[in-house]
Image (cartoon, rainbow, N blue to C red):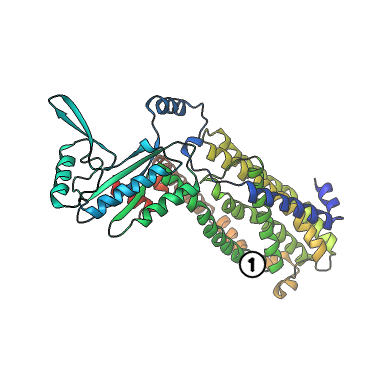
Amino acid sequence: MPKLLNRFLKYPWFILIVVIVFTIGFFLVMKSNSRMETDLNKYMPQKHPAFVYSNMAEKWFNIKDAIIIAVENDKGIYNYQTLKKIKDITKKLQKMKEIEKNDVTSLYTADNIIGTEEGLDVRAFYKRVPRNSDKLNDLRQKVHSNKMVFGRIVSNDEKSTLIIAKINDDVFSHDFYKKILELAKSYEGPEKLYVAGQPIVEGTLAYLMPNDMKRMVPAVLLVIVIVLFLLLRSIKSTIVTLFIVLFSTIWTFGLMALLNIPIYSVTTMIPVMLIAIGVAYGIHLYSNLNLYMRDHPFASKYEAVKDMIHNMWKPVLMAAITTAVGFISLLTSQVYPIKYFGLFTAFGVVTAMFFSLTIIPAELMLFGLPKLRRKNRGLRNSSDSNKDNFAFSFAMKIVKYKYVTMIFAVVVIIVSIYGISRVWVNSSFLDKFEKNSPIVLTDQFIN
């Protein structure tokens, strides 16, 4: 491998052009074919017993996911304005192409089943919205005496009611999600409307995941830029290292899109992982280069880069392989998001390693070596310079007080083992959101 890397030094422009062309290709594929997946039914193999029996039950009993709209009026729902809104919202839901007319249940569509001498009398609670107090009180009495409606569709305090719309698994989309939210928002005031249900939770998650990535990735990049500049003391080296993790991220998500594998909530963490892991390879290479330049200030550019490759290709390769193997072990999971997270993070780690061993040498050959700080130029002796190095001093103290270090390590291990015993599995979708987020508060209100 070092022979191959040394050959690459003769063709730096070729290396950069090939990497950039492939990166553009992966970016175009990623942009056109990437998609979010929040459907829980797609998280595990369909042959898994849990999904087999679930699908059988859904087929036998016509079980469907439901969108729930709660209408709340602090003064009570038994007034013309609120009852008309319930009727209007119900009719608009029934007219949507994604919803079958008979799959919408509300106070307007619910059946009031009354026992009579002749048998059962089935009537609607209301067709025309009652206006006068007598008809409103009559409606209240009908609802209160019907245990299938009172406490289920209408709350016990008579201040809120539910509109439930069942949908098929294959009709929910981001546009439909937005349409439902806009419908609810258009009928607010003075009533409060809450929208909930598993499709809404999944739709909210699909909406928030890209937004979280937009906020999270720049924040991580900012921290990494500061750390890189403090370590490398070179704007050029910092930029090159950032481009390496950027390219590896594009290749990773581009490959996912090329293989038609969606982005799950877990895989949104891949860019952060690659940024944190990928920059380490650049730090190793540039640190070795700086040490060589300090000890050999008159060495040529080719000699410095060749020495960097000779000394660092194996440590960087082994670090990448061990990290990738750790992520690949997640392939043993039956959960698709975990499986794909491990596989593609491992791929991203390997590409970051490959770019570090090819792009950094190519960049150095084309644009020159980084400039050393003045205070390091006169330090020809490594032992003298190391005495002023914080990391070196810290390492020497660890060696000097080795028993304290070992005792501290044992304590950490014991605490960690205890902590592992306290870990629990939380599979709640709602717990992925903040406690004060609208979707969580809505769920709490409806329940």
Where does residue 106 sit, x and y in percent of width and height?
A: 29, 42
| Whole-percent x, y for residue 303 in the image | 84, 60
Please determine whether, in this image, residue 32 is positioned above or below residue 287: above
Task: Answer left or right for 439 relative to 221.
Answer: left
The extreme bottom residue here reads: 374
* Res. 167 in view: yes
Residue at the spot 38% in from the left edge and 47% down from the top edge = 92
* Rendered image quadrant of residue 382: bottom right
Q: Please say if 335 is above or below 307.
A: above
| Residue farthest toward the front in the current orientation of the protein | 128
Q: Nearer the viewer, residue 149 or 198?
A: 149
| Amino acid type shown at disc 1 | Phe
Q: 142 above or below 8?
A: above
How many marks are shown on the rendered structure? 1
| 121, 207: nearer the viewer | 121
**Quarter that holds the C terminus:** top left
In the rendered image, is residue 444 in sight? Answer: no
In this image, 13 relative to 409: left or right? right
* Closest to the observer, 40 or 333: 40
* 10 Å crowding of disc 1: few (<14), some (14-19), many (20+): some
Q: Which residue is mark 1?
A: 229
Q: Is residue 182 left or right of residue 446?
A: right
The N terminus, quarter of image: top right
Residue occupying image coordinates x 40% and y 26%: 57
Task: State which quadrant residue 428 falls in.
Answer: top left
Q: Position of residue 399 (x, y in %)?
A: 58, 55
